[in-house]
Amino acid sequence: MTATQPRTNGLGTNGKYNPEDYDNFALTGPGTLAGDYLRSFWQPVYHSDDLPVGRAKPIKIMNQEYTLYRGTTGEPNLVDFRCAHRGMQLSPGWVEGNTIRCFYHGWVYDGTGQCVEQPAESQPFCDKISIGGYPCRDYLGLVFAYLGEGEPPEFPRYPDFEQFEGLFEIDSYPRGCNYFLNLENGGDLAHVGFVHRGMEGSFDGFTERLDIQAEESEWGVKVISRREGTDVSRTAHYGMPNTCHITALPNDTSTAPFREFLAWWVPVDDESHIQFTVYAVRVAPADAERYAEMRDVRLSNRSVPKEVLAQAVLEGRMRLEDVVPDTTDMVRLQDDIAQIGQGTPNRRNDRLGRSDATVIQRRRLWRRELQAFAEGKPLTNWVYDPEKQKAEGGF
Ligand code: FES
Ligand SMILES: [Fe+2]
């Protein structure tokens, strides 16, 4: 358990934590309760392969902009978005060694945000100048960063993914809605039988009802879903605060019947987020080439962005049934429609039933942890234990 200081901001106008206020979960800008809570965990912020050596990228996470760059030593670095001199955005500048030089007048910052050079100044005052610098590292194909205050917590490891010897796919996507809607959808197994009906690996939500049991686990919430009237059940694990480890709908059952994945729902701002995803594809070595070929064909056929279609469906200009299959990512389009279609993330009026067991459990844990966080009380130390998860029949 770790303790935090009592909070004095982000608590609403009366300065008190209101556990019923869904905004506590949804709003993640600096100084908000959920934002500071999420910042107390390591979060993925970028694909490692999309950050070549010597390049800098502007990124936005939880309503805050940053400069992410990979030094010539190969290490990722994360510093504030703007130069301290006169506010120039740093990403168009030059990466030199493990530092970044501002495009405007050449000030140089190291990965901690310390200014180390002011070439236009006859009397440099670098030692008095610093911007924010944030610990970051590559792991499982993603750049993870610690955006909180003070010393970062121990880096969370996923040993089963580290040791996995099959095919890894790093396959993230943006979605134009609040991250918490996707976080809740991730544990909402009943939606699969409606939103994704007809897709490979799905089921018929009308004739095959699920009995869903959700309980607290060492990592967050463990969910057991059983097809009513059968012994067919499946276990999935949702990690606090914004992670899951689950078996995905397969892309192609002939070569790879299972894709295990880790996912993180990370806010960009309050109206959009990225699901960072690491897939471990259990494809037999003999099928690996065919799997890759089929994936390339599938991706090259996708000519219409899911966002455009989702908007057209939500505005009533077309129906999902009118979408030509294979021209877009159908599963993500379906989820775009369902989640963006929920509107604002104010869920105060939701009428939850038994099939919402996972949603109820996750909200309960979030409320409890945020309450403790607001009061500076010890927080739960969540533990990822793949051996235990496997023994419980998750995968
Ligand atoms: S604004 Fe960056 S060096 Fe002047
Ligand atoms: Fe879905």
Image (tube, rainbow, N blue to C red):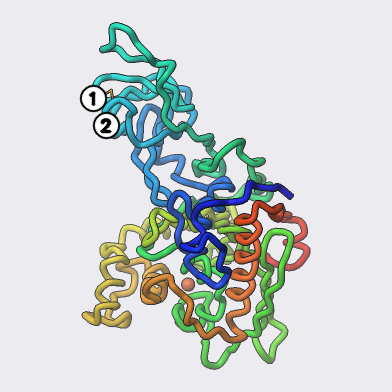
Q: Is 58 left, or right, of 364 in this rendering? A: left
Residue in view at x 40 percent, y 67 percent: 332
Q: Residue at x 31, y 82 (%)?
A: 321
Q: Is residue 136 left or right of residue 269?
A: right
Side of 389 where 268 appears, left or right: left
Q: Residue at the front extreme?
A: 14
- Work out whether residue 210 or residue 346 is closer to the camera in this orientation and state it: 346
Task: Name the element at disc 1.
Answer: loop
Ligand 1 quadrant assignment: top left
Using the image, determine if residue 111 lies above or below residue 382: above
| Residue pointed to by mark 2 | 88
**In the rendered view, would you say 4 is above or below 364?**
above
Disc 2 residue: CB within 8 Å of ligand 1: yes
The residue where tag 1 is placed is: 104
Residue 110 visible in rendering = yes
Residues under labels 1 and 2: Cα distance? Answer: 7 Å
